[in-house]
Every structure is written in C-alpha cells, then in structure tokens.
Amino acid sequence: MEGVHPSTLLARLTVEALRVGGVRHVVLCPGSRSAPLAYALGASDAVSLHVRHDERVAAFTAMGAAGAVVTTSGTAAANLHPAVLEAHHGRRPLVVVTADRPKELRGTWANQTTELQAELYGRAVRARLDLADVDAAKDPDAALRALVEVVTAARERCGPVHLDLGFTEPLLPDDEAGELPVATPLPTAEVPAASGVVQPGRRTVVVAGDATDAGLGAQARDVALAAGWPLLAEPSSGAAGPDAVAAYRLLLELPELGGAVERAVVYGRPTLSRPVTRMLNRPDVELVLVAGRSDWPDPGRPAARVAPLDLAALPPAGDDRGWARRWVRASFAARAGLDAALDLLARHPELPSGPLVARAVALAARPGDTLVVAASNPVRDLDLVVHRIPRGVRVLANRGLAGIDGTVSTASGAALDGGFGRLLVGDVAFLHDANALLVPPGEARPHLQVVVLNDDGGGIFSLLEQGELATQGQSEGAAFERLFGTPHGVDVAALCAAYGVPHRRVDGVPALVEALESPPQKTSVLEVRTTREGLREVHGRIRAAVHAAVRDALSEL
Ligand SMILES: Cc1ncc(C[n+]2csc(CCOP(=O)(O)OP(=O)(O)O)c2C)c(N)n1
Ligand SMILES: [Mg+2]
C-alpha cells in the first residue's frame, strides 16, 4: 500500500483482522485519536458497525454481541474495564481496540494520553498487542499476522483481548487505494478429547452452572438423561428447560435429596445458590469437573477429575433406579408446590412478585429468543423456575463477576444479530446502566424488551444477613433502608421518555402476560412495580410449600 498514510493502513489492517478473527459486530465510540479506525470501519462491509456515546455501555454491548469495541484514548479506555473484567471471569470473547499516541508521545503530558493504557487491563486480557502505525507500515504482513493472532485469541481462549494502537497524525481518511494484505484464519486449536470414566454405584447429581459455551449445557443435559441423574441447571447453563429439576436449590436442603448426594458432576461455573456451594464443598461429595476448555477456573477445592466426559463411558441408565425415581418424584412435586405457592402470590398484589414475574417471563420465551437475566434477585427468581424455560432459548447472565453494571448493554448487544431479546432486570441494575438506552437516532435499535422489576431499591439485601438484622429493631430497619435498601424514587417512565424509548407499566399478572406476548418492535421497557416489603416471608412461604409437597411425595415411596 505504497503512499497510504500509516494510520489509514493500520486501521484497515485492524478491520481485516477483526473480519478474519470472526468478529461480526463492532461497537464504536466517537473520538479523534481513533478517527482512522472510525473511517476504516465506516467504509467496510466486513463487519456491522454500531455507534454508542458511552464507552462502558459500548464495551458491554460488544461483549453481549461477542464482538469488538473501539474507543479513543484516556479515560475512554478505563470505561471499558468493567466489561473486560466480566469477560475475563465470565469467559466471553471480547476484542478491545483502544487508540493511543505513538509510543514516543506517551508519558510526556500529551493531552488525553496515559502511558498506562497499553497495559491497562493487566492480566485480565488473554492477549494484547501494542502496535504503532509507523511500525505496521514497515511490514504490513507481519502486522496483520500479529493483529489476527490477538483477535483470534478472544474466541479460542474465551476471554478479552486488547489492541492498543498508536496513531500518528493526520487523523484523517486517506482515499489512496492499494493492495491490502489479506489474512487467512488461523487454525483453531482442537479441544483435547479426553474421556472420564465415572464409576457406577454412587448417588450422583449433574450440576450445570453458568456456561457461555452452549455445548457444555447440552452435554450436561444429555449426560443427566442418559445416566438417570438429576439435572440441577442454572438459567444460563445452556441446560435450562423441562428436563431440569424444579426449585432444585430448595430440594438440596432436604436430607433425603441434597443430604444423600455422593457425587456431583459439574459443568460450567455454578454461582447462584448457597445450597449448591455447600454441597460442592462437602468433603464426602466426590467432585467431577467437566471442562469444555482447559482453563476453567478452580472451583475452590480439588476436584477428583477434570475432563470432558465421554458419554459412552457412563454407567448404564438405571444404575441406581431408586435414586433417579426419588428425584423425578421430588421434581414433579416441587413443580406443583411451587406453582400453588406462586398462584397464591398472584392473588396478593401487595406482596413482592419477583418469582411470579420470573415465571411469566420464562413461559413467554420462545425457541430462538435470547433471554438475559440480571444479577441479584432476577437471576435467582428465574433459577427457581428454570424448568419453565422452553428448550432452545438462549439464556445469558453476567455471572463472571455478578455485577449489576452493564446488564442492559449486554442484552442489547446480544440482540444485535436481529433476533428477539428480552431482559429481566431489577430497578437498581436498570438505572445503573440506563445509558444503554442512549442510541443515536440513525442507529439500529435492537429488538429488545426490557422487563424492569421495580421494587424501589435492592431487594436482595432483605434476603441476606443484613435483611435479617434489620428485622430486629426500628433503628436497624432505618439504617438498613439507607445503607442497603437504597430507595431512589426514580420515575422510570420519564427516564425512558427522555431517551425516546417506549415505556409501559403493567399491574397484575394478566396484563404482564399480555404485554410479554406482544413486545413492541425495537427497544422498549416494561415496568412491573412491586415492593421489597415481605420478601423474606414470600420466600419462606415458597420454601415451605415446596418442602411440604416434596416430603409428601417422597413418603409414598
Ligand atoms: C457493579 C456492582 N455494584 C454493586 C453490586 C452489589 N449489588 C448486588 S445486588 C444489588 C442491588 C440490585 O438491586 P436491583 O437491581 O433492584 O435488584 P433487586 O435486588 O431489587 O432484585 C447491589 C447493589 C454489584 N453486584 N455490582
Ligand atoms: Mg430492586
């Protein structure tokens, strides 16, 4: 590319590397130093381009789309950090491209430049490249290979990667055409096909935790069904659906079910409930971890084995028919007990309605939909009714660090492919990321229905130790409200109006169901008002109803 300015050349090489590295969606924020990238992306058909103002939003949007985010230098790069950390811990591919000054201008007080940028994300990134345009211009083929290697690492190693690109002025487009090197995809590393032989004769449960690799969830379900083992599936495991045990976290509390487990075969990373964590930490429970890729994080205690399980090596179904029958019965009874408790709740609109809303959202999902669920109560409410999610629904949750930031952005990124997406989110998490609704008028707004469960604050704390303490006296209660409950009184309708996003408020289950059945085109908000008052009691009632139904059913065995 004789004659092309180095900054234009590096920008074009970067777009080529994104294309060949499998990136389909690029989210760009405006900036001057990143202008060469903006021009190159705007002129390319190789990727679809989305523009956002807010870098934190852009990064989570890119993560939701398994794509790339492109920003200018300085604090813009720092605003990507939450998504980088989530992608690291949640094992989601994310390509971060930050524009920088050439190396000689860093650390010289040049405007909007920090010498920390190239290594800003530390060990959170799987691979990184600090490349100046003048160096890329000397050997474009080598530069392209280096770029492709880093971009490809995002997918292959399931995590974030960082390209910090030093651009020299002028930061303007250069119409000079020229031969651009073309990259060929790197060969993908094979997942080693190890097989784990699981000895028969132990009371086993299959735990399917959060997994971004949907194949892992499908494997968990197949293994559970083939062996006749109960499937304890978190919503974002890829194994949600009618095969999963209903209200499993409540069943684990019972000695004849959870107490009798001798072995857990764990897929993905379970994070949602204390009964699961407690079971996995029991020294008498043998732990078999099934890793889709080699570097799944340590569960916190030594596992007996870490291996992709070979289906053929499983004990024959019915290895312990009594065990399987016990769980099947329990799950049926739990479904009925749970439904009865939720139906009763529906008749009391003055009580917290989270689990009821979660059931309606689960039932409204259709195969092919994407359902994103926020941290805090929403994901735990959905976990309770995981068996109500139809098979074939893609369920995502930011469980890497379980942050309440970036959730609306993640969901809108996940819906960028054109399919229908729905997000179930609490009010605080929604407000935290309200800027995800800030989409420039010319940009495509994804088909996303945001269901905000508005209990005016952080309901989850009522269910934790802090909430228990708050029940003990008036002053404890007042302190709790200020420090943890954090009511805000925000007018969600007015907020949505400011962003130009359609808002609708529904009261009661029939109106909710109707609104879920006919989501408007593009992005919309459906607000369900509820209360935090009585949350502990509601969960107590659900637990009691499920336990009673299950005990009853098991006593007949
Ligand atoms: C970025 C971040 N800050 C703080 C927290 C701690 N936190 C967990 S849940 C929660 C409250 C969430 O409230 P809301 O979204 O309304 O859901 P609810 O608990 O009411 O169901 C907070 C602040 C977090 N997880 N992530
Ligand atoms: Mg709330």
Image (cartoon, helix red, strand yellow):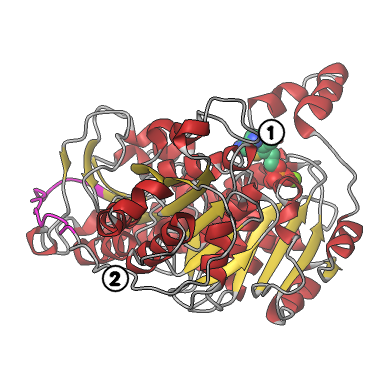
Q: In x, y percent, where is residue 469?
A: 72, 21
Q: In the depicted view, which residue is nearer to us: 407 or 225?
A: 407
406 within the magenta span: no
Q: In x, y percent, where is residue 483?
A: 78, 25
Q: Could you tell me the amino acid type at mark 1? A: Phe
User: How far is the residue under mark 1 from the one under mark 2?
Assistant: 54 Å
Q: In x, y percent, where is residue 142?
A: 25, 54
Q: How crowded is mark 1: few (under 14 residues within 10 Å), some or many (20 or more)?
A: many
Q: Does the residue labelled 1 lie within 8 Å of ligand 1?
A: yes
Q: Closer to the observer: label 1 or label 2? A: 2
The residue lying at 61 percent from left, 37 percent from top is 74
Is any part of residue 415 visible from this angle?
no
Is any part of residue 343 visible from this angle?
yes
Total marks placed: 2
Q: In the depicted view, which residue is nearer to us: 130 or 221?
A: 130
195 within the magenta span: yes
- Residue 477, compared with residue 163, is above or below; it is above
Residue ID for mark 2: 182
Q: In this view, does 285 lie to the left or right of 30?
A: left
| Circle 2 SS class | loop
Quadrant the N terminus occupies: bottom left
Q: Residue furthest front?
A: 3
Secondary structure predominantly adopted by residues drawn in magenta: loop
Q: In this view, does 557 lie to the left or right of 525?
A: left
Residue ID for mark 1: 461
Q: Is residue 399 left or right of residue 438?
A: left
Q: In the depicted view, which residue is nearer to us: 541 or 263?
A: 263
Looking at the rendering, the stretch of residues picked out in magenta corresponds to 189-204
Q: In x, y percent, where is residue 538?
A: 70, 46
